[in-house]
Image: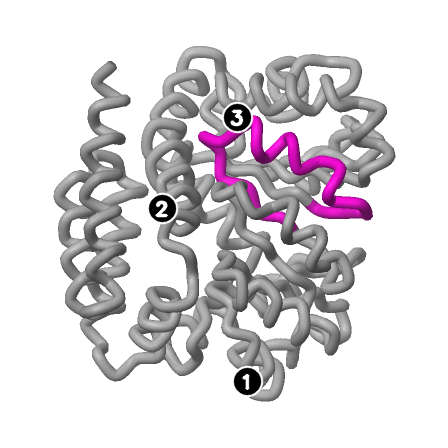
């Protein structure tokens, strides 16, 4: 009951701030960050909003332009639903649950889980995927990365049913059709993440016209690691008007190369030169997870249901179709101390 009241109170304040943002985006976002810092209880929330405060002190930075653009081009209900699910359900209440269970049970729980999905495979295992999300929420996981391997319209019910979760749908531009966007019209807890390629221009135009929340992702190969974060790519990304620009390494790629890309991402992000926020999917995800529970872990399930986790070995036989999520995490991610 207390958690429901706290969420309702915060949601009301955020809703009013979003309404005011169109008229005065700079002042509204500063007030919203100040309020969020006052409400913050955990280390993750405080450090995040303090970082946001420092960032917004640079009134000439490109992020103010991004905020103004978001205020006038994104449906506020979509911003509210996705933001509350990510910020409150996942990073506040979910983080508390994760720390509590990890301390008691002695295994690591990721703050987010990635699922590779295709429409045909999903149709064959619909109940298993719905049960997985239910199990994840019980463990404190409310952020889900859905990697489309085809026919994403077939698994929209997974997003719609779990309206208390934040879903990021990684997809190709050709999957962003007008008929698909019609199906998504009533779903507010979703952010599209479109692959950055020439066809992304039209896809992002469609999303922008409909006031949907979207970002883009840039995959890179090992040989591109030293130069992937360059002016041409970042200018192209900025012209697509995404909130976030994700950088994702392909396979295989070594740790040293990934670290080099992450350092470039950090430098560009701190400079505030571009009207999009750069995210390294691997290292920023690890950083968030490490703040929540000290030990970071990455979890992805392939479309055949098997576990893929770069920081574990010998657990490829673990499958969400055969074992409960708790057993998989306990086996693959035991606490080392």
Residue at the image position 21 percent from the left and 79 percent from the top = 59
Distance from Cα at disc 1 to Cα at disc 2: 28 Å
Question: Can residue 254 be seen in the rendering of this structure?
Answer: no
Which dot, 3 or 2, sits closer to the camera?
2
Q: Is residue 68 visible?
A: yes
Spatial separation of the CA atoms under disc 1 and disc 3 = 39 Å
* Eye-nearest disc, 1 or 3: 1
Q: What span is colored magenta in the figure?
A: 147-169
Identify residue for label 2.
Answer: 80
The residue identified by callout 3 is 108
The residue located at (62%, 22%) in the rendering is 329
Residue at mark 1: 235
- Say if 257 sits above or below 112 in the image: below
Name the image quarter holding residue 245: bottom right
Residue 93 x %, y %: 34, 27
Query: Image height check: is 286 above or below 267?
Result: above
Which badge, 3 or 2, comes first in the chain's sequence? Answer: 2
Q: Is residue 144 magenta?
A: no
Residue 250 position, x and y percent, is: 75, 59
Of pointers 1 and 2, the one earlier in the residue sequence: 2
Q: Residue at x 33, y 36 (%)?
A: 88
Check disc 1: other Cα within 10 Å, few if <14, some if 14-19, many if 20+. some
């Amino acid at each position: 009951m207390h958690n429901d009241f706290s969420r309702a109170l915060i949601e009301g304040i955020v809703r009013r701030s979003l309404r005011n943002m169109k008229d005065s985006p700079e002042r509204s976002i500063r007030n919203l960050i100040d309020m969020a810092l006052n409400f913050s209880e955990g280390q993750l929330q405080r450090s995040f909003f303090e970082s946001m405060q420092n960032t917004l002190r640079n009134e000439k930075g490109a992020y103010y332009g991004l905020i103004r653009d978001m205020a006038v081009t994104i449906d506020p209900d979509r911003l509210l639903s996705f933001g509350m699910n990510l910020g409150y359900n996942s990073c506040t209440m979910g983080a508390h649950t994760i720390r509590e269970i990890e301390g008691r049970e002695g295994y690591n729980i990721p703050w987010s889980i990635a699922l590779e999905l295709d429409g045909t495979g999903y149709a064959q295992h619909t109940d298993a995927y719905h049960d997985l999300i239910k199990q994840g929420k019980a463990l404190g996981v409310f952020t889900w990365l859905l990697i489309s391997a085809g026919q994403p319209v077939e698994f929209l019910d997974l997003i719609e049913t779990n309206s208390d979760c934040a879903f990021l749908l990684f997809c190709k531009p050709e999957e962003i059709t007008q008929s698909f966007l019609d199906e998504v019209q009533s779903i507010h807890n979703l952010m599209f993440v479109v692959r950055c390629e020439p066809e992304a221009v039209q896809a992002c135009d469609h999303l922008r016209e409909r006031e949907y929340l979207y970002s883009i992702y840039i995959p890179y190969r090992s040989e591109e690691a030293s130069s992937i974060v360059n002016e041409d790519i970042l200018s192209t990304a900025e012209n697509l008007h995404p909130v976030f620009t994700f950088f994702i390494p392909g396979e295989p790629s070594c740790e040293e190369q990934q670290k080099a890309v992450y350092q470039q991402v950090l430098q560009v992000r701190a400079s505030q030169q571009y009207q999009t926020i750069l995210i390294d999917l691997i290292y920023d995800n690890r950083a968030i997870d490490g703040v929540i529970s000290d030990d970071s872990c990455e979890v992805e399930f392939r479309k055949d249901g098997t576990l893929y986790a770069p920081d574990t070995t010998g657990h490829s036989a673990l499958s969400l179709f055969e074992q409960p999520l708790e057993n998989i995490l306990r086996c693959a991610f035991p606490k080392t101390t």
